[in-house]
Amino acid sequence: MKKFLALLMAAMLAMALVTSGCGGNDEKQAGGEKLLRVGTEPSFAPFEMQAEGSEELTGFDMDLIRAIGKQLGYKVEISAMGFDALIPALQADNIDVALAGMSITEERKQQVIFSDPYYKSGLLVMVPKDNNDIKSIDDLKGKRIAVQIGTTGAFRAEKVEGAKVTAFNDNGSAVLEMKNGAADAVINDAPVLKYFLAQGGSEYAKTVGEVLNAEDYGIAVKKGNDKLAADINKALNELKQNGEFDKIYNKWFGEAK
């Protein structure tokens, strides 16, 4: 009996310690700063890119998610990865949010939950400045097209009859392929190519034709994480109401939207 009582007391003590430990962690969690883990692909200027002379990531998306985090009381931690790794990282719970100029498509909506749209974009074709034969996407039949892997530009290029499509991890590499004469054109999101031209790319490149496939960008979270998606939408709406969204938009695009 004494042995039994001793074992019982030891078990109760162990349980008390475990309970105490759990309570301490909960209190620390409640009193500490909440963490929002964000994944991005930082070669999609002006939405996400590495700041010059710094390891910090900057751009429209980066400013926006930091403002959303602040609005919700989160500390924002941003990790860089390949664009095609973002959705798998969400599904594996390695990140909470994917934000990388990601177009809201029916295919992606089967895999993730998207926030309300925060930016309307589209696609453009870019060619060497001295090329006068390619005037629109219709002139790319049988041509060599460089794209960024996993983007809607890559999906659209695959539909061009007879085209040889080469995919790269980032837009810069796709543009370099064209600049070096190994591709006839690049297809990517309109704001990305326009920003590239404004930053000096217009010395050797230009866009042609009309904006294609008007599309919305959204912030992606894991399927089932409805509360976080709702919180992000609430914060987005509040930022639009208090003028902070327009302030961020003005910084990167020059006009309120």
Image: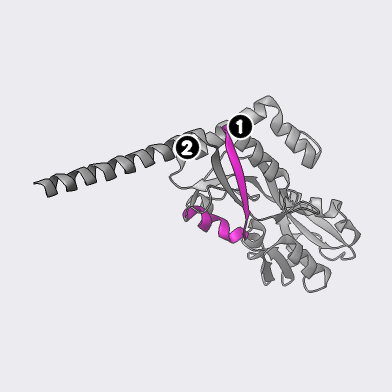
N-terminal label among 2 and 1: 2
**Does dot 1 land on a helix, a strand or a loop?**
helix
Q: Residue furthest top?
A: 242
Q: Is residue 130 left or right of residue 150?
A: right
Q: Is residue 87 magenta?
A: yes
Among the 4 quarters of the image, the one containing residue 16? top left
What distance separates the C-alpha of mark 2 from that of mark 1?
A: 21 Å
Residue plotted at (86% across, 61% down): 205
In the image, residue 104 lies at what x, y percent? 58, 48
In the rendered image, which quarter contains the C terminus? top right
Disc 1: which residue: 71
Q: Residue at x 47, y 56 (%)?
A: 92
Q: Which residue is mark 2?
A: 28
Left or right for 192, reference 206: left
Neighbours of disc 2 within 10 Å: few (<14), some (14-19), many (20+): few
Q: Count residues near mark 1 (Cα–Cα under 10 Å), then give few for <14, some for 14-19, many for 20+.
A: some
Which residue is more in the foreground, 87 or 10? 10
- Where is residue 118 drawn, in percent x and y? 64, 39
Residue positioned 38% across, 41% down in the render: 21
Q: Secondary structure at mark 2?
A: helix
**Where does the magenta region start and end?**
71-91
Residue 195 horizontal/vertical position (percent): 80, 50
Amino acid type at circle 1 is Gln
- Across and down, in percent, residue 82 comes to 62, 61
Q: Nearest the camera: 25 or 149?
A: 25
Q: Residue at x 62, y 59 (%)?
A: 81
